[in-house]
Image (cartoon, rainbow, N blue to C red):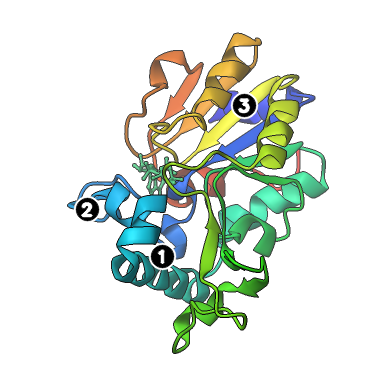
């Protein structure tokens, strides 16, 4: 931990990269943890893909209603608030997140690139109207006032990443001196291209994750511990 504290103090351009492990201590499940992961015993393509949205709509809606209920009933934890404080103090330049729960912004972070979109809003496929995600929990909540289908603003399997978020993540990654991964298996591309790119460009790569990840072999430091319980609570608010 002392090495991470020193790197955080010395780095003039630090980028944080978060995955679902950042929100499990808020009460939201991740995807690939044994037993509790959302993909355990399920086929993501049947639930979170454009095909599922078109041809398996009931299961698709049930899956996203369940996830929206979760993110509305849980809230950001001290780790999300710590990152927001670090942004305010200039300790970090930005957060590249795979998460769609909006908890970084909810905790006060403003410089957030959401690579996989957001589950906090819905968009009508016919007229483009935006609605808050809570609407999905109402009767007929997926039907727009125009009669069109309201889809979650997440990136589905089969869709490309939002260009603005991707460009922002590239802009933060290029000059990074320290690239800090928090709570991701780094199993999914192209999101896992960013830690690799940071490393190739000479950044120090630190991975904090409860289990081994796909890119541990590239890291300068791997901390296999719980984010809040063991790591972030031991990092200072100010440097
Ligand atoms: N502390 C530290 N690590 C944790 C904690 C915790 N409290 N809780 C979970 N983890 C770790 C798990 O061990 C796991 O390796 O976080 C990692 C989360 O990995 P995934 O479940 O694969 O989630 P993520 O990496 O965000 O997945 C990326 O896959 O299906 C897509 O769109 C989905 O954005 C998601 C993407």
Residue at which label 3 appears = 179
Q: Mark 3 to mark 2: distance in Å?
A: 32 Å
What is the crowding at mark 2: few (fewer than 14 residues within 10 Å), some, or many (at least 20)?
few
Residue 63: percent from left, percent from top: 34, 66
Residue at which label 1 appears = 27
Q: Which mark is residue 42?
A: 2
Q: Give the mark, 1 or 3, whose residue is nearer the N terminus.
A: 1
Q: Is residue 204 above or below residue 8?
A: above
Residue in the image at 38% along x and 33% along y: 224
Is the C-beta separation of discs 1 and 3 under 8 Å?
A: no
Nearest to viewer (mark 2 / mark 1): 2
Give 129 or 110, whichever is nearer the viewer: 129
Q: Is residue 16 above or below residue 192?
A: below
Give 68 or 82, whichever is nearer the viewer: 68
Which quadrant, please, contains the C terminus? top right
Is the C-beta separation of discs 2 and 1 under 8 Å?
A: no
Give 136 or 35, whichever is nearer the viewer: 136
Query: Seen in the image, is 59 located left or right of residue 15?
Result: left
Q: Give the mark, 3 or 2, whose residue is nearer the N terminus.
A: 2
Residue in the image at 51% along x and 79% along y: 143
Do we see residue 130 in this rendering? yes
* Quadrant location, ligand no. 1: top left
Q: Mark 1 to mark 3: distance in Å?
A: 26 Å
């Amino acid at each position: 931990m002392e090495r991470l504290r020193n790197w955080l103090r010395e780095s003039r351009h630090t980028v944080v990269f978060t995955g679902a492990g950042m929100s499990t201590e808020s009460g939201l499940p991740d995807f690939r943890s044994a037993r509790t992961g959302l993909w355990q015993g399920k086929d993501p393509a049947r639930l979170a893909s454009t095909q599922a949205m078109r041809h398996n709509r009931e299961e698709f809606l049930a899956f996203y209603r369940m996830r929206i209920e979760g993110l509305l009933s849980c809230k950001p934890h001290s780790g999300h608030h710590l990152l927001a404080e670090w942004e305010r103090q200039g300790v970090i330049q930005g957060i590249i997140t795979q998460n769609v729960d909006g908890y970084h912004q909810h905790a006060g972070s403003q410089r957030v690139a959401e690579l996989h979109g957001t589950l906090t809003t819905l968009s009508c496929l016919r007229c483009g109207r935006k609605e808050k995600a809570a609407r999905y929990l109402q009767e007929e909540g997926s039907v727009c006032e125009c009669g069109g289908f309201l889809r979650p603003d997440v990136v589905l399997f089969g869709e490309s990443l939002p260009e603005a978020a991707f460009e922002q993540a590239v802009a933060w990654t290029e000059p990074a001196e320290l690239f800090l991964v928090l709570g991701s298996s780094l199993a999914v591309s192209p999101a896992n291209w960013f830690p690799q790119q940071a490393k190739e460009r000479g950044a120090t790569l630190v991975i904090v994750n409860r289990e081994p990840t796909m890119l541990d072999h590239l890291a300068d430091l791997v901390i296999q511990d719980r984010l809040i319980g063991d790591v972030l609570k031991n990092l200072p608010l100010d440097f």
